[in-house]
Each structure stands twice: as C-alpha cells, then as structure tokens.
Image: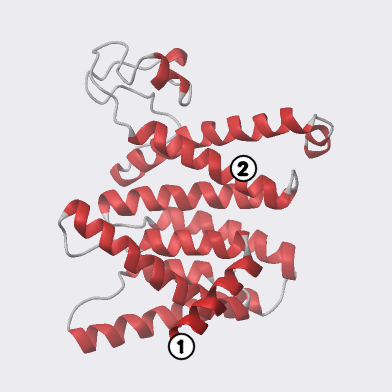
Amino acid sequence: MIALLETLPPGVLLCFVAALGLVFGSFVTLASARIPQGDSIVHTRSRCPSCLHVLGFRDLLPLFSWLLQQGRCRYCKVKIHFRYPLIELIQMVLFLSCYFVAGISFEFIVLALLSVMLLILIVIDFEHKIIPDGLQIAMAIVGVVYHVMHSGIDIALVIGPLSGFASAMALRLLFSWWKEQEALGLGDVKFLAVAGLFLTPELIIPFLLMSGVIGIATAMVWQKVSGEKEFPFGPALAASLFLCVLLPEQYNEAYRQLISWLAE
C-alpha cells in the first residue's frame, strides 16, 4: 500500500493525506462523543443530536457536508456546532504535519494514529475532564510499536513507563502535600507512564517543562473562557507529547532557549 502511494504525483498525494485527515477528524468527533458515554464507536449509526434522525452518506462527508448544508442539520435545520468541522480541520493539519516530517512511510502511520488518539484525548478531557483508560491502552500499544521502531526491544521499554509513572506520582503527592489540593489526576499520571514509551531519556525533562508552559497558557485561556478555576491538564500533556515526538530536535532547542531566557 505504501509503495503504491509513493507512485502518486506529490500534489495528488498531498490531497490524499489531507482528505484522510478530514475523515479521521470526523472519527475523532464521533469517538470523543461516544467513548465517555460508553457507546460503541462501530455498531451505532450516527444521528443528529437534536432530531435523532439517522444520518446518511450525504450528511457525513467531512467538512463538505457542514459547508453544503450551511452548518445546519438537513432534516431539522438546527445549527450544527462549529466544533465538528474545526476538529476535522485540526486533524487534517496534524496528518499533513506527520506527512511533511515522515513522508509516506510506516512511521507516518504510527505518528498519524498517535495524533488521532491525542486529539480524542484532548476533546474528551476538555469536555469531561477525564482520560479514558481504553484510550490510554490504545496509545500504549502505539507507543510500544514506536519504541521498537526506533530503539528495538530494550530495557527502556520498561524503564520509560515506570519513570514517567514514578515522576507523575511524586509530583502528585508533593503538590497535594504542599497545596493541600490535587495537582495531577490519576488519568494524567497514567498518561505520563504511556508518554515514557515515546520519549528518549534526554527528552523527558524538556517534555515535562514544556508541558507546564503549555499548561499555564491553556489554564489562562480556559479560565477566561469558562470561568472555572480548575482546568484539565491532559490537553497540555497531549500537545507537548505530539510536538516532542514529531519534532524532537526543534523541541529540545525550544527547551534550551526557554532555560536560557529564564536564567537571564
């Protein structure tokens, strides 16, 4: 399949990756809505959330259905939330980013799958403040594949997740003792263990620090938009991990520049 795709003209290949991103973006909206409710992401037909009419092929074309129907349900004319095409566009950008870094390769497939899972995580954590265990297990499986691709089967396959889990638990206990409130949810702790599968030892500290920076920025926007003091930290961890895995050298350089700036 990869060899066949490599024979396509660059422009056609780019359009294919973009379309694939939109399709998986549609899956992200479906999965992020159904997983927290315990609904099947395979066997249940898609319906309009307002009139519950079963949606057909015309209604499910990523982005284009929303544009052609002017952002409304074809049956009850109720407005369809902008989050649906926005998530599809974000996933398209993520797929294109993976393509520009890895080309059409097995690594592209792994990175693209990771981006899908991380985007599902971000949407669910923002909306429900949870990180489902099933999603973490799926990411762990992709993490094992990624680690074996880059480092083979070695002791780091065990040490990485244990280090991530131990660091997260230490931060959780320390902050809980210091501030007498919870710093990291158990879902975040598990996520850091999964992240250990993707990170080399030299990237762990940059990942944690940059996650904190992204988390602070996220918290400021979250509190201003929602008015809530507590904010989900999972999206910051997810964004940091994706950037770290996709662009490790640039990520490390950004970390060094941040440290240099803080030291001045």
Instruction: Name the colouring of the figure.
Output: secondary structure
**Would residue 215 be found to the left or right of residue 60 on screen?**
left
Q: What's the residue at 67%, 80% (across, down)?
A: 155
> Is residue 208 among what the camera can see?
yes
Above or below, 47 relative to 28: above
Classify mark 2: residues with Cα within 10 Å, few (<14), some (14-19) or many (20+): many
Residue on which disc 1 sits: 264
Give whichever of 12, 29 is nearer the camera.
Answer: 12
Can residue 162 be seen? no
The structure residue drawn at horizontal position 61% and vertical position 80%, both measured from the top left corner, is 201
**Mark seen at residue 96:** 2
Q: Is residue 254 above or below residue 72?
A: below
Percent from the top left, x then y, of residue 162? Answer: 51, 79
Tell me which amino acid carries mark 2.
Leu
Secondary structure at numbered mark 2: helix
* Residue 150 placement: quadrant: bottom right
In percent of width and height, residue 140 lies at: 54, 61
Which residue is found at the position 36% from the left and 44% from the top? 35
- Left or right: 154, with 164 as reference point: right
Q: Nearer the viewer, residue 131 or 26?
A: 26
1 and 2 marks in contact (CB < 8 Å)? no
Q: CA distance from mark 1 to mark 2?
A: 37 Å
Q: Which residue occupies 31% across, 73% down? A: 184
Q: Which quarter of the image is occupied by the N terminus?
A: top right
Q: Earlier in the sequence, mark 1 or mark 2?
A: 2
**Residue 198 picture quarter:** bottom right
Q: Which mark is residue 64?
A: none
Where disc 1 sits, the SS reads loop
